[in-house]
Amino acid sequence: MASTPVIKLGGRTFHIIDTPRDKDTTEQDVGMIDYDREYIYINPEMQSNSSWFITLLHELLHYVFYACARNDLRNDEALVSAMSESLYQIIKENPEYFQHREEYTDD
């Protein structure tokens, strides 16, 4: 069995699970993060490849605000959506700054 992909954030390791949601899923309900179990669920059937990455960033931003005890921001879907879409565009349009560079590491 293949292992699930993981992403590390804030000392935690989140497993990324591609999974279709139940029949009541709406187009806006394409991702979910489980803070306690450290799982990020993404429905790949309802979105393009770029939307999949935006959804991943969206769920990670929910965790960032959760970890900072900022529930007002964590629950602000408009803010989280705007930030995830903007971050995706920055990464997509400037990939040279988001690849591993030895000179940027302290290892």
Image (cartoon, grey):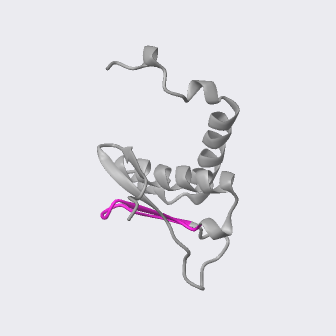
Residue at x 70%, y 59% (from the top left corner)? 48
Q: Can you name the residue that lies furthest to the bottom here? A: 23
x and y percent of residue 97 in the render?
58, 25
Depth check, front residue: 87 or 41: 41
Depth check, front residue: 97 or 27: 97
x and y percent of residue 53 in the render?
60, 51
x and y percent of residue 93 in the render?
70, 33
Report if residue 96 lies within the magenta region: no
x and y percent of residue 13 in the render?
33, 50
Query: In the rendered view of the protein, which quadrant contains the C terminus?
Result: top left
Q: Is residue 18 left or right of residue 90?
A: left
Query: In the rendered view of the protein, which quadrant contains the N terminus?
Result: bottom left
Q: Is residue 84 left or right of residue 12?
A: right
Residue at x 67%, y 54% (from the top left corner)? 49
**Considering only vertical position in the picture, is 100 above or below 78?**
above
Q: Quadrant of residue 106?
A: top left
Residue at x 31%, y 64% (from the top left corner)? 37
Q: What main secondary structure does the magenta stretch of the protein show? A: strand
Q: Quadrant of residue 46?
A: bottom right
Residue at x 60%, y 84% (from the top left corner)? 24
Q: Is residue 95 left or right of residue 16?
A: right
Q: Which residues are magenta?
A: 31-43
Report if residue 32 lies within the magenta region: yes
Marker count (numbered): 0
Q: Can you name the residue that lies furthest to the top here? A: 103
